Amino acid sequence: MQAVAEERLLWYRTSEVAYLIPAAIQGHAWLRCAFTTRRTDSVARGFNLSYDRGPHHVVSRHREALLKALGLEGSALHTVSQVHGNRVCVVDSAALQNGLAGVEADALVTTQPNAALGILAADCLPIVLYALHTPLVALVHAGRMGTSHLVTRAAIGVIKQQFGVHPTQLHALLGPAIGACCYDLDDRAVRPFQKRFPDWPRFIKPSERHRDTARPWTMSLTAANEGQLLAAGVPPAHIETVSPCTQCHHQHFYSHRAEGSKAGRGMAVIGIRRYGKPPYLDDS
Ligand SMILES: [Zn+2]
């Protein structure tokens, strides 16, 4: 298996799967986490993970191959209908039994072993949250709207209230997303932040590119969500931002801004596996 180290992300690609492992989790064998990229070695049409964007049997094959690569085969992959809001879905034993069909949410949390969580994205920011002492994992889908609805803060609140895990015990990984280098916005998109976020100039700035005068602003999804993490009490040393820009690097990542409505979707996936080590460590 090919493993190319590039800063804090390890790139893996075979004929069946294409994904990145954050170097920060390498010491925690129980924690299985990846952000997918778009091209495997052999599938020219891409490693799309969304059933809405490709043939069902192909997407199923991609999802199975991804779980297997992370040593999560046998785990059901739990996803929700993402609606750019701030609802948090707790994947407990009842959810494992009943499934999540029809559930609308933009964050998922679990302490269940053998449950894998998935969030789809093409430019939106996927955030991984995990706690070490109480094995707990969570995923947040933080695009512009979810960020304005404080979805990251909502997820941290549910983790504290329902699982007793204090924010100081949480670690956060911010994954690939459209960067401030590309994320130009118009006045209408910026207005909710100007109204409700006193610190909005920290993550929304006048665009210096003037590529599009209808969009005079640029936003950093990572800076905005780092702010939510810090305000909630996650220690700065526990926040790792590994966010290559999906539009600048759309040869590696699906990007709605770069490709429009036809763009496929990548996935952030996370799960708990109490035994063994990740298969990708065997021959890297
Ligand atoms: Zn960019």
Image (cartoon, grey):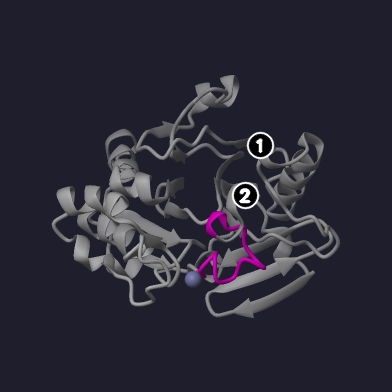
Helix, strand or loop at mark 2: loop
* Magenta stretch prevailing secondary structure: loop
Q: Residue at x 72, y 63 (%)?
A: 280
Q: Residue at x 36, y 44 (%)?
A: 146
Q: Nearer the viewer, residue 200 or 14?
A: 200
Q: Is residue 261 above or below residue 198?
A: above
Q: Badge 1, how many Cα within 10 Å: few under 14, some, many 20+? A: few
Residue 232 position, x and y percent, is 23, 52
Q: Residue at x 47, y 39 (%)?
A: 111
Measure the alpha-carbon separation of dots 1 and 2. Answer: 9 Å
Q: Which residue is situated farthest in the left direction here?
A: 198
The quadrant in which the N terminus is found is: bottom right
Q: Which residue is situated farthest in the front direction here?
A: 213
Residue 93 position, x and y percent, is 52, 26
Helix, strand or loop at mark 1: helix
Please give the residue where the numbered disc 1 appears in the rendered image: 52
Q: Which mark is residue 25?
A: none
Q: Badge 2, how many Cα within 10 Å: few under 14, some, many 20+? A: many
Residue 42 position, x and y percent, is 86, 61
Label 2 beta carbon less than 8 Å to ligand 1? no
The picture quadrant where one finds residue 50 is: top right
Region of the chain picked out in magenta, as a range: 244-257
Magenta residue check for 175: no
Q: Nearer the viewer, residue 148 or 22?
A: 148
Question: Answer yes or no: do the residues labelled 1 and 2 have beta carbons within 8 Å?
Answer: yes
Q: Amino acid at mark 2?
A: Arg
Left or right of 228? Residue 222 is: right
Please give the residue where the numbered disc 2 appears in the rendered image: 265
Q: Is residue 283 above or below residue 120?
A: below
Residue 179 position, x and y percent, is 44, 67
Q: Residue at x 41, y 66 (%)?
A: 212
The quadrant in which the C terminus is found is: bottom right
